Image (spheres, rainbow, N blue to C red):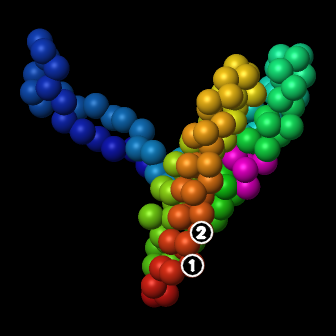
Amino acid sequence: MWKVTRVCVHGYPRNMTAVTPQLSPSRAAAVFGFLGVALGAFGAHGLHDILARNGRLDTWETAVQYHLIHAVVLLVLARSAPSNYSRLSFWLFATGIVIFSGTLYLLALTNLRWLGAITPLGGLVFLGGWIALAIQKAK
């Protein structure tokens, strides 16, 4: 949960300690889930006019849908028994959210069409996460 580390900062003693939060898989899943809900609500309300003007309401909705589905998958993976936990799948899904949904969010806001060329890479990363999950060794 929290990690205590020794830090050396110029002008401070070498044995000074700092307590920093550690981003566990469960926390990462919670952050992704929070952001998915927040971006969905913000898109429906605060950004609605921009998205409608760009003709990208459906793009935003697709980004949120994939974001939230995979945030739930992250939570399930993080909460599963350690022997069934696939780190590779977890990080592929997290990376897929950033690339796939992230480029769609940016495309919807900016209407920069070249971002659409990057989005499929996020889809491939999602597929890699599902494949990694399917072929992991049962323990």
- The CA span between labels 2 and 1 is 6 Å
Instruction: Look at the image and give the residue range highlighted in magenta.
Output: 65-69
Residue 31 % position (x, y) = 60, 41
Per the rendering, the mark at residue 29 is none
Q: Quadrant of residue 80?
A: bottom right
**Residue depicted at x 65% and y 61%:** 73
Question: In the image as oriented, which residue stretches furthest toward the top?
Answer: 11
**Residue depicted at x 41% and y 44%:** 22
Residue type, numbered disc 1: Ala
10 Å crowding of disc 1: few (<14), some (14-19), many (20+): few
Residue 26 % position (x, y) = 55, 54
Residue type, numbered disc 2: Trp
Q: Describe the element under mark 2 as helix, strand or loop.
A: helix
Front-most of 75 and 45? 45
Residue 93 % position (x, y) = 57, 56
**Residue depicted at x 58% and y 49%:** 122
**Residue depicted at x 83% and y 17%:** 50
The question of residue 79 being in magenta is answered with: no
Q: Quadrant of residue 23?
A: top left
Say if mark 2 contacts mark 1, CB within 8 Å: yes
Q: Describe the element under mark 1 as helix, strand or loop.
A: helix
Q: How many marks?
A: 2
10 Å crowding of disc 2: few (<14), some (14-19), many (20+): some
Front-most of 52 and 87? 52
Front-most of 110 and 49? 110
Q: Disc 1 designates what residue?
A: 134
Q: Disc 2 designates what residue?
A: 130
The question of residue 68 being in magenta is answered with: yes
Residue 97 visible in image = no
Q: Main secondary structure of the magenta part?
A: helix
Residue 64 % position (x, y) = 76, 42
